Amino acid sequence: MPASASEPRGWWARYRSPAAPGSPALVTLTGVDSDEYPFGSDVEQPDDRRPPGWAVSVTRSDAGRVHRVLVNQPGVPLLWFVELDEPAADPPAATLLAFSDARHAHGEVLTAADAQAAGVRGDQQVAAVRWWTGSGLVHQLYVAPQHRRKGIATALVTAAFGVQAAHGRPLLHGDGRRTDDGEAWRAGLAAHLQHWFEPWSRRLPSMTPDPGSARDVG
């Protein structure tokens, strides 16, 4: 759910799908970039149509598993994801890995167990974002060099923003510590997206080559 350059704006459209017999109830939470409602409002919807200005839409079960995340970003390549929870990390963290092949549908989200069973390997990923779940602070963002300049970083961070919100956690954001590539990425964002990432305050070393970029999905 993006924001304006000066003041945050945006609200959440919530729709609960009728549960089929033997299936868990699903909730779709859609972040909308508009000032139709006060910032952060959670508004129940009568159907699953996405409101004008929607930015990210996340479908999860009542048990908390995220099944799908879609980003309203025309032209972005096919992306599906693996969500890795790291509750034992200090501080607790989460990672969203992005893949760009036809093995799964666009927007589909696999758990670590699903990915391992399907034979998904960490070295097949095209991008990854990691953040601290307790604060929403982005820790790392990486896109493989051959997949850059395609909008993948923005789509991935927007997807992670939705996933974090769908879990009821603090909104995703970034501080001023970035690599040169990270700052170039932020500089290319629209002002309403830059709002979530503080001005550059500390230069970090490049992650290319990145020995930790091929995260293990097991």
Image (cartoon, rainbow, N blue to C red):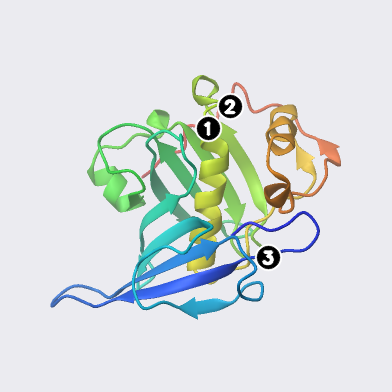
Q: Which circle marks residue 158 in the picture?
A: none
- Secondary structure under tag 2 reads loop
| Residue toward you, 2 or 164 | 2
Q: Which of marks 3 and 2 is in front?
A: 3
User: Residue 9 has which mark?
Assistant: 3
Q: Is residue 148 left or right of residue 22?
A: right
Q: Give yes or no for contact between labels 2 and 1 (Cβ–Cβ under 8 Å).
A: yes
**Foreground: disc 1 or disc 3:** 3
Q: How far apart are marks 3 and 2 (CA)?
A: 35 Å
Which residue is rendered at x = 41% and y = 33% of the image?
A: 77
Which three-letter amino acid code belongs to the residue tagged 2?
Asp
Residue pointed to by mark 1: 213
In this figure, which residue is indicated by the disc labeled 2? 210
Name which of mark 1 and mark 3 comes first in the sequence: 3
Point 64% across, 28% down: residue: 207
- Residue at left 32%, top 31%? 101
